[in-house]
Amino acid sequence: MQVVGTVRVSGSGVARRPPPSRRQCRVSAVVTTTAAPPKVRQRVTHSMAPEKAEVFRSLEGWAATSLLPLLKPVEECWQPTDFLPDSSSDAFEHQVRELRARAAGLPDEYFVVLVGDMITEEALPTYQTMINTLDGVRDETGASACPWAVWTRTWTAEENRHGDILGKYMYLSGRVDMRMVEKTVQYLIGSGMDPGTENNPYLGFVYTSFQERATAVSHGNTARLARAHGDDVLARVCGTIAADEKRHETAYGRIVEQLLRLDTDGAMLAIADMMRKRITMPAHLMHDGRDAGLFDHFAAVAQRLGVYTARDYADIVEFLVKRWKLEALEGGLSGEGRRARDFVCGLAQRMRRAAERAEDRAKKDGQRKVKFSWVFDREVIV
């Protein structure tokens, strides 16, 4: 689905610009076609009006008391080794054999979505970099004591465990071609990401609010499928990751709530801006050096298995509308802000109708198979 451009968001300082020449979104699970290597596109940057930085300076005390407590002390955090065979134990080989026996019951299509999720998590350097481009909240020194900077570094440290544990599990399972997986990670980090946030924290925190919930949904569903296929340990792993994502989602959602309180019009316009552009998945520039449509194919499998679907996208939009009480917003909204509110509040229903039409078309088109390098070039239905 092509994005139709964005409108001027005066309250959050987003300037009017023409539609991007080549931006695809994931409303129906498959949404971004990339080349290898991806083309560089001109983007709007630093779109937040300079005076808006004062909003974030005024929130530093709030961030220290309302965001940082959502982070867990390292000594209380789970670590990948808590779920993996103990390499220092004499029982290590036996534990690995048990892991491989459980993994043998998982189909290739499951490993495609698990690998795709793991690769998305492993591109964490890109995500920290993206947050540190946001004006007014970046880590100015690399070790700043500012609450915004502390949050970003510690959030990154917590997220770092996700790709780590999934990668080690898959390495021990013997079910995936780890060299191709590792190459895909390297390609993705080198390619970066373009979420359309324009160095603007209003847009950036709308994006992360959505994305954290989307990853929680995805990992929660991989946990459900792992359990259904008999791998209860992997189910606990994926469920634990999903719980982290939900906690992080709470934090980013709180930030947007505060922006709506302090700058109702600017925040509402920013929400509408991101929803008009659509929320691209962090790994939308994924490729393995062979398959230029790899992200599309991975997303199609996720859609078919029910790991992350067009309906999930619509559900997240609806959830955020309710969480932020957007339907009740009145005071502080300009005419443009009210139009933005009405657009966002009606979006989920329109998306569900589009999803139904897409599902009907997919049924008529029938199934096709694609080879995935991640599973030794075996074919998987997309």
Image: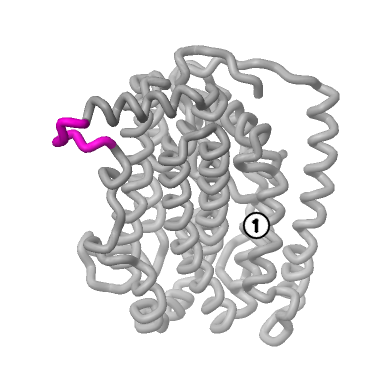
Identify whether 115 is placed above or below 276. above
> In x, y percent, where is residue 19?
67, 46
Q: Residues within 10 Å of mark 1 (few under 14, many from 20)?
A: some
Q: Is residue 274 magenta?
A: no
Horizontal and vertical percent position of residue 48: 50, 67
The image quadrant where one finds the N terminus is top right
The residue carrying mark 1 is 316
Q: Position of residue 240 (x, y in %)?
A: 42, 52
Does residue 88 show up magenta in the picture? yes
Q: Is residue 214 above or below residue 173?
A: below
Give the residue at x 28% y 50%. 79
Secondary structure mostly taken by the magenta-highlighted segment of the chain: loop
Q: Is residue 9 above or below residue 2?
A: below
Q: Name the quadrant containing residue 170.
A: top left
Given residues 343 and 295, the one toward you in this image is: 295
Choose top left, top right, bottom left or bottom right for residue 70: bottom left
Q: Which residues are magenta?
A: 85-91
